[in-house]
């Protein structure tokens, strides 16, 4: 009976360790992957490399830009235009601008989010300031470029896409390395 | 061979006896029940009338958080582990638990965890104030400094529960008396076997969630921090992946207790035993695949909402099987209404109400309206209090004569039952109305239109609290000076091995395994 008990003990202990590892090391990457594939959570993909599949002149999509500062972030951060109308498939350049109003050198990181979420997989960025962090010296201003393409396969029900950026203060975090790889 | 317990405090500190450890668990959970109950009284006193009366909003939030944590992890879970320690070896004819020394350890680290948790109340910045569900970033970026103590306490509780459940599984699987096949086991042993597996599967996930919090707070990771590429919604997924099975961890052993009490006082065997076993297993399985019904408002795709909605509604089927089996057990039974039976019948009625409101909440479109209102508070108190606590109270009255060889005061037990039953319903039924009218949870104050029902609810809560004082008095007076009973069968209708040993149960039982036919 003692060996049977020991077997049960070992099996269940291994089970507990496996579940802990599952929660710590499998669930977060799995969730990120799931969100990237489905667009749930409004996460957008990384740099878009695919060829443009032709412009769909038959419809126009409104793309709105929203910016927010996270928590105590003191920068001024805004889009240069608040809304553009685009045909799906056409690469559209827009700019945002940021101003470090403080007297210290800082590093910011903009995190994008797309609403509605079912538009997220169809919103491609060929160039985006959010792929890297933005170091701004004290008092420095900068134009932040973005080039995006709305995929022609965008569900027809989507007439308006809202792209929001939240600017986070990452000064002093991880040596200013780019922290986000999937934005 | 047979030797008695050691003398003095060392009996309790070093004991490996399942009955001693069961007693320790039960008294500990009783103490935590009163601590958590005291927090609840502070909450209801503050909410007695609109406006700020007794405590400031931050302290109010500390009270709701600590009330939830202490009741779930300190009162209800240890109570059922205590019952398992006492009763499972007696019910399956085992001399003790399979891993007695681990049993001692798993109990004694538990008070340490709660001393750490309770000590945060006296720290600068106060106790955790982010709700018992501790959603990030409220519990990371915006948490009080004491959050690290909270995380450590959760880790210890998790280790304790995992060890306790491994012990119970090992006992049930390996220590059954000859002839005691799995399908002959009492339902309480069955429900605990399944609960044990749930605990081993999800307590590590909770430990993972708090570890990720710890790393986000102290070591610069970004699991739940969007600034570093993380996502706060991930926290909710991880938490509820633990949290939903957790509610079944709480209620399944309660089902087992009810399945023991109702046949005894109906003088009929349990109706549909095997369907009870399968229903329990089905509930346990479903509990793993419905977690996101707690998160309908985070912005899920419609397909996700529909899946989690239908999967959740499916749980009503095995739960319904159980309720109908209990009712059918009572049908045409020779019923007598002793205190344990009163609690069991109240359990069936009130748990069913809580189940119905659960089905209402499972409807995604309705849930978006009910989310984070007092309707949810009413729902889970119907299943947690009228479910788990009523069943635990019934279990104490049912087995107390076996434990201490003394009979409790039946009249006092009935007074306590009616006070608790009426007080509970006055406290929590109006919270359905408050929630439907839009009163949100977790605020120290409310709009004037909610005033009347809140006052009613507080009066009921105080009544319910008073009933628990009667409970404590009844248990204490029974243990110290109750009428002595010696017949092995306290209840004439009771079946099972636990009623074949002498009363009170001797320190060592089944040193030679009984023969089960």
Image: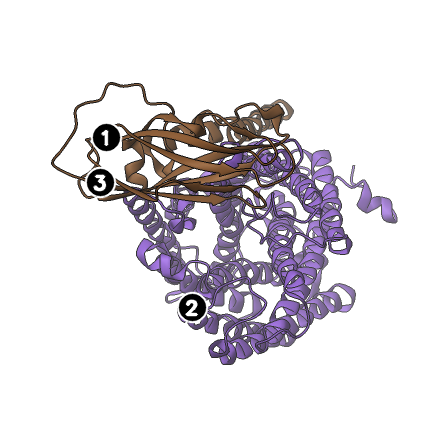
Chain colours: A brown, B purple
Q: Nearer the viewer, mark 2 or mark 1?
A: 1
Q: Which residue is mark 1?
A: A151
Q: Which x, y percent locates residue A86? A: 23, 36
Q: Looking at the picture, do discs 2 and 1 lie on one chain?
A: no
On the picture, is B275 further left or further right than A166? Answer: left
Q: Which x, y percent locates residue B379? A: 45, 62
The Cα–Cα distance between marks 2 and 1, rounded to whole angstroms, is 41 Å
- Tell me the subunit letter for badge 1: A
Label 3 secondary element: strand
On the picture, is B254 further left or further right than B287? Answer: right
Residue B114 tag number: none
Relative depth, front residue between A76 and B75: A76
On the picture, is B486 further left or further right than B306? Answer: right
Q: Which x, y percent locates residue B132? A: 58, 52
Q: Is residue B177 visible?
A: no
Residue B438 tag number: 2
- Tell me the subunit letter for badge 2: B
Examine the rendered structure and indicate whether residue B437 appears above or below residue A10. below
């Amino acid at each position: 009976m003692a060996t049977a008990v020991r077997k049960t003990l070992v099996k269940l202990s291994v089970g507990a360790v496996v579940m802990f590892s599952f929660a710590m090391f499998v669930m977060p990457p799995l969730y990120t992957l799931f969100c990237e594939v489905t667009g749930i959570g409004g996460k957008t993909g990384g740099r878009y490399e695919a060829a443009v599949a032709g412009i769909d002149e038959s419809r126009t999509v409104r793309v709105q830009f929203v910016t927010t500062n996270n928590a105590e972030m003191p920068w001024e951060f805004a889009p240069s235009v608040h809304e553009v109308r685009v045909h799906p498939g056409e690469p559209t350049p827009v700019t945002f601008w940021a101003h470090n109003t403080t007297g210290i050198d800082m590093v910011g990181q903009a995190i994008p989010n797309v609403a509605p979420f079912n538009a997220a997989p169809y919103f491609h960025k060929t160039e985006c300031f959010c792929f890297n962090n933005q170091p701004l010296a004290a008092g420095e201003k900068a134009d932040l470029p973005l080039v995006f393409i709305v995929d022609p396969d965008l569900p027809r029900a989507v007439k308006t896409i809202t792209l929001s950026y939240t600017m986070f203060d990452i000064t002093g975090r991880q040596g200013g390395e780019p922290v986000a790889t999937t934005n | 061979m047979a030797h008695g317990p050691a003398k003095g405090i060392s009996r309790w500190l070093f004991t490996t006896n399942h009955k001693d450890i069961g007693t320790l668990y039960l008294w500990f959970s009783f103490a935590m029940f009163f601590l958590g109950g005291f927090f609840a009284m502070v909450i209801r006193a503050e909410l007695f009338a609109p406006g700020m009366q007794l405590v400031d909003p931050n302290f109010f939030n500390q009270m709701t958080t600590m009330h939830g944590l202490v009741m779930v992890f300190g009162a209800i879970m240890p109570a059922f582990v205590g019952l398992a320690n006492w009763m499972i070896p007696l019910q399956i004819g085992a001399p003790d638990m399979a891993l007695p020394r681990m049993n001692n350890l798993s109990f004694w680290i538990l008070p340490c965890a709660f001393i750490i948790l309770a000590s945060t109340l006296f720290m600068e910045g106060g106790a955790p104030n982010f709700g018992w569900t501790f959603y990030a970033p409220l519990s990371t970026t915006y948490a009080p400094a004491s959050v690290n103590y909270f995380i450590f306490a959760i880790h210890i509780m998790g280790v304790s529960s995992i060890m306790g459940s491994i012990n119970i599984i090992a006992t049930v699987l390996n220590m059954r008396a000859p002839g005691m096949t799995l399908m002959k086991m009492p339902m309480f042993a069955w429900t605990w076997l399944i609960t044990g597996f749930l605990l081993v599967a999800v307590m590590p996930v909770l430990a993972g969630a708090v570890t990720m919090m710890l790393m986000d707070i102290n070591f610069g990771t970004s699991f739940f921090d969007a600034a570093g590429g993380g996502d706060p919604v991930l926290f909710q997924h991880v938490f509820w992946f633990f949290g939903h099975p957790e509610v079944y961890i709480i209620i399944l052993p309660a089902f087992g207790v009810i399945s023991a009490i109702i046949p005894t006082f109906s003088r009929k065997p349990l109706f549909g035993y095997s369907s009870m076993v399968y229903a329990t297993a089905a509930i346990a399985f479903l509990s793993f695949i419905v977690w996101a019904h707690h998160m309908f408002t985070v912005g899920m795709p419609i397909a996700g909402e529909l899946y989690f909605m239908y999967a959740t509604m499916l749980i009503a089927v095995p739960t319904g099987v159980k309720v109908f089996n209990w009712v059918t057990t009572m049908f045409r039974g020779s019923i007598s209404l002793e205190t344990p039976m009163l609690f069991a019948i109240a359990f069936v009625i009130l748990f069913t109400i809580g189940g119905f409101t659960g089905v209402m909440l499972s409807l995604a479109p309705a849930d978006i309206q009910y989310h984070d209102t007092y309707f949810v508070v009413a729902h889970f108190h119907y299943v947690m209090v009228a479910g788990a606590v009523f069943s635990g109270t019934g279990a104490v009255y049912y087995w107390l004569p076996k434990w201490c060889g003394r009979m409790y005061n039946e009249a006092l037990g009935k007074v306590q039952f009616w006070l608790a039953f009426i007080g509970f319903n006055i406290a929590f039924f109006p919270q359905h109305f408050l929630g439907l009218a839009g009163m949100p949870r977790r605020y120290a104050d409310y709009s004037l239109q909610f005033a009347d029902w809140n006052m009613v609810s507080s009066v009921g809560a105080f009544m319910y609290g008073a009933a628990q004082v009667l409970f404590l008095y009844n248990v204490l007076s029974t243990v110290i000076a109750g009428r002595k009973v010696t017949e092995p069968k306290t209840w004439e209708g009771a079946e099972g091995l636990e009623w074949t040993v002498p009363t009170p149960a001797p320190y060592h039982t089944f040193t030679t395994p009984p023969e089960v036919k």
